[in-house]
Amino acid sequence: MSPHQLPASRRRAPGTLNAKFACGDFGNAYRTAYFVDSSKTRNIFRRALLLTFLLLPAARSHAQTAAELPGNSAHSAKHPSTSDTWPPQAVRGSHAMVATDEALGSQAGVTILKQGGNAVDAAVAVAFALAVVEPAAGNIGGGGFMLVRLADGKTNFFDYREVAPAQATRDMYIQNGKLIPDASTLGYRSVAVPGTVAGLELALKTHGTMKLSQVMAPAIHFAKDGFPVTEKLVREFDEEKSGLEQFSVSKRIFLSNSRNKNHPYKVGDIFRQPELAATLERIVKNGAADFYRGKTARMIVADMQSNGGIITADDLANYQPKVREVLRAHYQIEGHRWDVLTSPPPSSGGIAIIEALNILRQTQLKGWNDLQSVRMVLEAMRRVFADRAAYLADPDYSDIPVAGLISDCYARELFATIDPQHASSSKEIKAGTPHACGISAGQSVPPNTVVSLGEGPHTTHFSVVDAAGNAVASTYTLNDSYGSHATSSAGFLLNDEMDDFTTQPGVPNALFGLIQSDANAIAPNHRPLSSMTPTMLLRDGKLSFVTGSPGGPTIISATLLSVINWMCLGMDAQAAINAPRFHHQWLPDQVVLEKEFSPAFEQALNANGYATKRKGHLGLVNAIGIDPQTSDRLGAADPRDHGSAVGY
Ligand code: DON
């Protein structure tokens, strides 16, 4: 029996200790080279059709879910407030699995898989569907990353991160030496050139088997025929009202139900987005070219011109998604070879995760009720975030010491700086001098850094594994929840990704309080540094775990913890997601703890020198594990907010 399929008597509650699977000294860790860029009557009928389309697959998968999880469903109907109601086990499927933030998104993916599409076809379908049903983060007006691993072992990383427009300048958000409030987070000037449509088209052309018309059909149905408004959407529209009501198109689309005297939407109302449906139909007809050079491009440019934005027709026409080499590390743990496949720059997350794992392999991790294990991870996070702040930026414009940052020798030096008895101080821990093994650290002075950390509103991660074993991990975002809160006349929200640049050297960025380097300063065509970290694990060469998270900087912590939980601590798939999370990002020098940690545990951390802060939840990890014995797909969606795993 595999470590991931323990008999019930041996299954551990999330975060508890099982010494057999304690992780420490991961064995002979080594890495491969890192490479950058080689590049209603009628309506009732229509609704019935739509419901058939949507719910048939769902009904089947939920029946299966019920078998797997007696008395439970694959996703929670209400905003779950306590972990007591969380599903203890993953959704099991013997063929394929889709795990996303939204049941409709997961069902869209499963529909495509059942029609014969592969994981990439399904992932593109999910991404377009979430752009309609999850406006907070699903998008076509933003950007993201997609990590693909095919069943034959080939991997690709699609980078469709937004870029700064040509007219963007280093100080564009500064006036009289100060950051103009909201300038980099609200409205048309905070928008970077979107990459999602180009990236999805490229991924589909490269690895998909279906046409845009097939994979976009679910999204177009949701936009045109509408879908029932959930409690989550009502809550979000209310929470985001002050931003959305500043922009006429946003106000009209999200804040007023034209079929009900323009009252706000209520749970169960049907939410239709006709302008978005028309845009999606043009993309089906003309491809991404419509978005970047066609009618949609012209609409975006007109929006910019009338609202003070700076994105031009040339900016859109010049946008290029990139295919990058996947960042890798290998570990030997208890007789098994584990491969970590993760995100290269302009994501900071892959480097951070490998660097942290390299530090942590020097110690013994036991579980999250073990103070020392939590402390070790916190100290690794502290050091990794200090390096992130100094070294990471757009790899096309800066020389990132990737090999050094992920070197085992460097990690050993960092580990040696950890006091086993007491918290380090972030005042004393600065970025290190990364170097590859056999090459001395040199005297290089870390680049200038700017400081900060806050908490991230939204972004979304989904995972897909098909029947053949092809897998996709994808995280994409508008940055803030509802992005810039400005909606294009073409019916989709526009990102505020410009805030991921170093908007004011020496000052934390507006949304996440992250300190960032000068190398991440605003410059035309540069990609802002990201924390999004779609990641996969292979066990003895076979796909084992597909993961990733939203959460700004907490993406890195949530993803890292899911990896440790599965790979090192041998947790079941759902336990690996339910386990309590914690975060440290170097500055501010404080630990962020989910509410599941006991007061006594928090006090023990305080007694050890750690300042602590509570947060309800960190990250939303929608993961899929593979049962190494049966190859069943184990869909582990995050119960923290409506995660949904659907499989068959
Ligand atoms: O790319 C990034 O790192 C950020 N724009 C992600 C923002 C995010 O995750 C917001 N929150 N949940």
Image: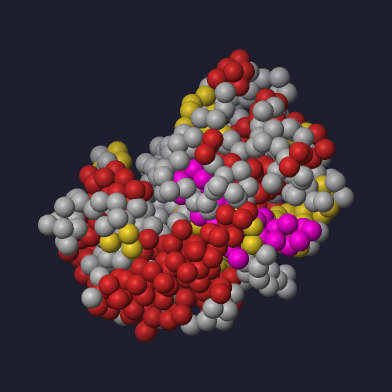
Instruction: Say whether residue 458 is left or right of residue 228.
Output: right
Position of 553 relative to 319 (above/below): above
Position of 510 relative to 305 (above/below): above
Which residue shows up at 67% across the image and 65% down it? 94
Position of 359 relative to 272 (above/below): above
Which residue shows up at 29% across the image and 51% down it? 267
Q: Which residues are magenta?
A: 624-648
* Residue 423 position by quadrant: top right
Instruction: Say whether residue 566 is left or right of residue 210.
Output: right
Asked if residue 629 is among those painted magenta in the image, a careful observer would answer: yes
Out of 117 and 435, give the one closest to the viewer.
Answer: 117
Q: Which x, y percent locates residue 83? A: 53, 36
Report the number of numbered marks. Answer: 0
Out of 304 and 168, give the one closest to the viewer.
Answer: 304
Q: Quadrant of the C terminus?
A: bottom right
Out of 427 and 161, give the one closest to the viewer.
Answer: 161
Instruction: Say whether residue 458 is left or right of residue 74.
Output: left
Q: Which x, y percent locates residue 545? A: 67, 55
